[in-house]
Image: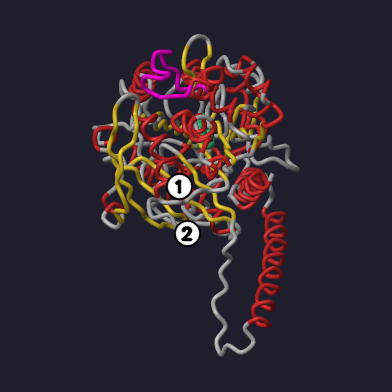
Amino acid sequence: MATKKESTKKAVETKTANTTKKTTATKKSTTTKATAKKLPEIKVVDKKKVVFLASEAAPFIATGGLADVIGSLPKALAKRGNLDVSVILPLYSGVSSEFRKDFKFLISFNVSVGWRWQYAGIFYYEYQGVKFYFIDNEYYFKREGNIYGFFDDGERFAFFSRAALDTISRLDIYPDILHCNDWQTAASIVYLKGMYYGNEKFRKIKSVFTIHNIEYQGIFNMDTFAELFGFSENTRPFVEFNGSVNLMKAAIEMTDIVSTVSPSYANEIKDSYFAHGLENIIIRNERKLHGILNGIDVDYYNPETDKFIFKNYSLDNLEGKKVCKAELQKMLGLPQREAVPIIAVISRLVSHKGLDLVRATLEELLTGDVQVVILGKGEIGYENFFNHTAYCYQGKCVSIIAYNQDLSRKIYSGADIFLMPSKMEPCGLSQMIASRYGAVPIVRMTGGLNDSIKNYTGDSGNGFTFRDYNAHDMLFTIKNAVRTFADKTTWADVQKRAMETDFSWNFQAEKYEELYNK
Ligand code: GLC
C-alpha cells in the first residue's frame, strides 16, 4: 500500500529511468544510422516474454476477483514497456460478442486428452497492449450458465492446460515465463516440467504459479492421473496427495516460483487454519513463495468517469457522491436521508466471506439508525437469511440476490461504509474498489485485507479494522465507524484517506517484474 505522494514520486523516478534508457537507445541508433534521412522507429526487440494462463479475464468473461486480476495485471505489465505480454484463455460461449466479432482465427489442431484427441481452434485479439489467445472447443466451453461447476471440469481444464502449451509450440510463441493461475491451469506446469521437458524450448521456460485461493485445489480420483490427464509416470510423486490427484499441490511442488496475492496470505497459508490441508506442502516450498498484493484497474474503477453511477465525482468535489447516495436510496426504497449511514456488503454469499458474523449481529445493528444494503448471491442459507431480514426491516435493510456490475457500482458510489469481515481473504479487491468510491471499508485483519486497510486512529489509517473472528468485535467496530460518521470533519478525513490510497497496479506490477527477473 502506498500513499498518493509516494506513488507519484516513484512514478516520476520510473519515468526518469525510462527516459534515460530511451535517450541512450536513440543516441546509439543516431550514430549507426547517421546517413538515414528519417530515423526508424525504435523497437525493443529483446523484451522478455510472459504468457499468462487463466480461466477468466475481464472484460471478456468474469465471475470473480481472478478475472479482475487477469484483466488488469497483464495490461499494467505491458504498459510498463519492459515485457511482451500474452494471455491464453478458454473461449467460453459467454465471451461477449462485442469482442468476439473482432477475433481473428489463427489455426486449429488436435489436442491429446487421455485416450482421445480433441479439436482446438485458436483465435487472436489484441487488447490494451496485451495479446490474447482464445482456445475454442464447443464441447468443453459452450455451456449454459456458469463457467465452472460441471461434472467434467477436470477434463475441461486438462484440455485447456494442454492446448495452451500446444498453442505456444504451434505458434512458436515460447515465453521466458509461463505464469499460471489457480488449479484450472495448474496441470500446465505438470506438463511443462514433465512430458514437454524433452523439448529444449519448453525446458527453457520458467514458471510462476499464483494461488488466488488455496481452498480450490482441483482434486480428482487417482484413476484420472494417466487416463484423463495423461501425466507422465515420473510426475506421480508430485501430483498425488492423500490418494488423489491434487493439481494445486502438483503445481506448487513443480513450479519455479509460487506467488500468492498478498504478503499476509503468503504467511497464513503455512498454517493449517488457512491452508486447507496444504500447509506442509507450502512450508516445504517456502523458499520459492512470494506474496504480492493485487492492484485494481483504477481507470475502470473511477468515480470521475464511471458510466454506471448516478453522478460522477472526485476526491476534490464530493457533491456527486451525495447525489449517488440519494438516488441509491430512492432506487432501493430507503428514506432519502443524508444523515443516516449506508452500510454496504457486496460479496459472494459464501462462508469464508465472514457472513456468519453478519448473520449473528445484523438485527442488533439494525436497531440503530443505519441503512444496510446487501448485494450478492451464493449459498441458499445466506440468501434466505438476508431476504428474510430485509423483509422484516423494510426501509432499513435491502437485499438483492444477484451478481450485477451496474448495481455494484451504484452501491459503491452511494454507500458510506463498506463491510468486509472475511474469515479468510487471499487478497480481496472489493475493499479497494469501495475505497476508491469513498465507501470507507470495515475489514477483518486477514490476508490482503490486512495489507490494504489500516485502522483509523486520527493520524493515520484508511478504514476500520478488527482482528478476531468474533461477531461482537465486528459490531463494536461498525458502531465505532457509525459514530465517526456522525462527526463530519473526522469522517471527511478518513474518507479522504481511503480515497487517496493508491491501489493501482503501478507498484505491484513492478514487483511481478522483479519476480520474473529472478
Ligand atoms: C480470489 C480470492 C480473492 C482475490 C482474488 C484475486 O477470488 O478469494 O481474495 O482478491 O482471487 O486474486
Q: Is residue 318 above or below residue 451?
A: below
Who is closer to the viewer here, 117 or 288?
117
Callout 1: few (<14), some (14-19), or many (20+) C-alpha neighbours within 10 Å? many
Q: Is residue 13 above or below residue 237?
A: below
Q: Is residue 317 left or right of residue 373?
A: right
**Label of residue 129 in the image:** 2
Residue in view at x 46 percent, y 33 percent: 185
Secondary structure at badge 1 equals strand
Whether residue 419 can be seen here:
no
Callout 2: few (<14), some (14-19), or many (20+) C-alpha neighbours within 10 Å? some
Who is closer to the viewer here, 275 or 35?
35
Residue in view at x 72 percent, y 54 percent: 6
Who is closer to the viewer here, 263 or 490?
263
Residue type at mark 1 is: Val
Residue at the extreme right of the image, as rendered: 459
Mark before the other along the chain sequence, 2 or 1: 1
Instruction: Find the magenta span and give its range.
Output: 214-232
What percent of the width, then of the height, locates residue 308? 38, 51
Q: Give the quadrant of the C terminus.
A: top right
How many marks are shown on the rendered structure? Answer: 2
Residue in view at x 51 percent, y 37 percent: 180
Secondary structure at badge 2 equals loop
Q: CA distance from mark 2 to mark 1?
A: 11 Å
Mark 2–mark 1 CB contact (< 8 Å): no
Classify residue 81 by image quadrant: bottom right
Residue in view at x 59 percent, y 38 percent: 486
Q: Give the quadrant of the N terminus.
A: top right
Q: Which residue is mark 1?
A: 87
